[in-house]
Amino acid sequence: MGPAEMAFYGLAAVVTVAAVLASLREGSRRPTTASRKTAAQALGLRYLEELTSDPPTRDFIPVLWFAEDLPRRYHFRNVMFGESGARNTWLFDLEVYEARSRHGDILLTTQTVALFNIPGAALPIFKVIAGKVAAKKSVDIVLPFLETHTLIAEDKAAAASLFLNAGPGFLSGETGWSIEGGGQWLALWRPGAILPSDQLKAFLERADALRAQLA
């Protein structure tokens, strides 16, 4: 074996080892089922295992991700559920894939999501995106959170009224949230973050506080 071949195989070995280590690191960040079940019990939620994507995606979350241009597949993991008179609460880890029949699905993003069903609510269909992006349906109102987020809505006037009523303190000083809502449904998450089980309580409490400002 010549020097060039040795160098090639040496590089291949380094790349392979790096990929394995990256995979192990990613795996180590995933919460275990046991830790999620323990967290569900502590939160007063019922652990529901997993839900496949289609159905019940559009029945389960009928109005969210309303403006996607590409086909999507959703995988709900570690689903937890609780109900009260004011709202029903789901907490789950979500994987979003772009469906490609020829080359297999491509994982786009993962996140831990708090989803609320609020009986009697009539939210306009809207989306809050973490970061500032150019969007033709963006809502132009003066609120502090729109310095770090983008608000998109089909009915701009209704969405503007909703967030103006929420007040200038809504998400003020915070970054990295995504929110989608419509009708009786409201979902909140931080893109790309599957949260450790010991952070679920603080996340759900903050998400519920934001929910209370909107519905």
Image (tube, rainbow, N blue to C red):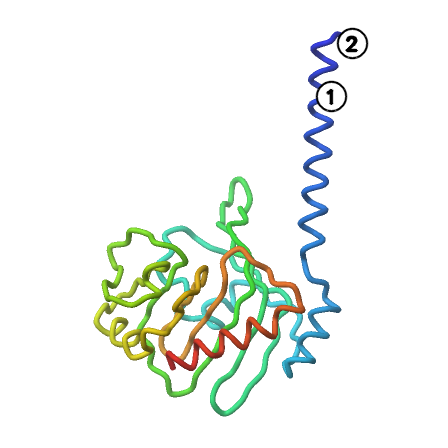
Mark 2–mark 1 Cα distance, whole angstroms, equals 12 Å
Q: Which residue is mark 1?
A: 10
**Picture coordinates of residue 90 (x, y %)?**
55, 75
Looking at the image, tell me whether mark 2 or mark 1 is earlier in sequence order: 2
User: How many numbered markers are drawn?
Assistant: 2
Give the residue type at disc 2: Met
Tag 2 secondary structure: loop
Element at label 1? helix
**Image point (51%, 63%), residue name:** 54
Q: Position of residue 116 (x, y in %)?
A: 48, 77
**Residue 167 shown left or right of residue 200 in the figure:** left
Q: In the depicted view, which residue is nearer to us: 14 or 1?
A: 14
* Residue 1: mark in rendering: 2
Single out the residue that lies furthest toward the front. 173
Label 1 is placed on what type of residue? Gly
Q: Quadrant of the N terminus?
A: top right
Closer to viewer: mark 2 or mark 1 = 1
Residue sitting nearer the eye, 91 or 177: 177
Percent x, y of residue 147:
33, 59
Question: Which residue extends farthest left?
Answer: 157
Q: Residue at x 67, y 55 (%)?
A: 29
Q: In this image, 110 relative to 5: left or right?
A: left
